[in-house]
Image (cartoon, rainbow, N blue to C red):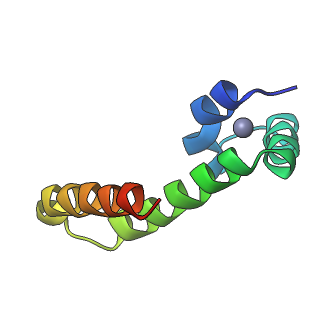
């Protein structure tokens, strides 16, 4: 059974569709029972989608924005 560290290690391959069927099933099984990794994958997918739609010169600003968002989320808790 996959643990959270394994999942993080495979997450970008998972989103890029690079995993074998067996690996993909293991990831899905883990996601089904782990809310933390579900959240992680969702945010990763979101940031990949955002990055794909931005020209590269805007990425530093995106990093700053992501930091501000992360900070706002911490403060909201
Ligand atoms: Zn997990």
Report the residue at 65% width, 43% height from top: 18
Please provide percent x and percent y for residue 21. Answer: 85, 42
Q: Nearer the viewer, residue 24 or 44?
A: 44
In what quadrant does ligand 1 lie?
top right
Left or right of residue 26, residue 50 in this image: left
Does 53 appear above or below 48?
A: below
Q: Quadrant of residue 74?
A: bottom left
Report the residue at 68% width, 26% height from top: 6
Q: Nearer the viewer, residue 45 or 4?
A: 4
Report the residue at 35% width, 56% height from top: 70
Does 42 appear above or below 7?
A: below
Please provide percent x and percent y for residue 55. Answer: 20, 69
Does 4 appear above or below 77?
A: above
Please provide percent x and percent y for residue 32. Answer: 86, 51
Report the residue at 42% width, 64% height from top: 76
Does 37 appear above or below 4?
A: below
Location of the N terminus by quadrant is top right
Q: Residue furthest left?
A: 57
Please provide percent x and percent y for residue 71. Answer: 31, 56
């Amino acid at each position: 059974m996959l643990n959270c560290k394994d999942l993080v290690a495979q997450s970008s391959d998972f989103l890029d569709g690079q995993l074998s069927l067996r690996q993909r099933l293991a990831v899905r099984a883990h996601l089904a029972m782990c809310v933390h990794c579900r959240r992680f994958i969702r945010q990763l997918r979101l940031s990949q989608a955002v990055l794909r739609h931005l020209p590269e010169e805007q990425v530093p600003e995106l990093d700053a924005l992501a930091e501000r968002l992360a900070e706002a989320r911490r403060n909201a808790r």
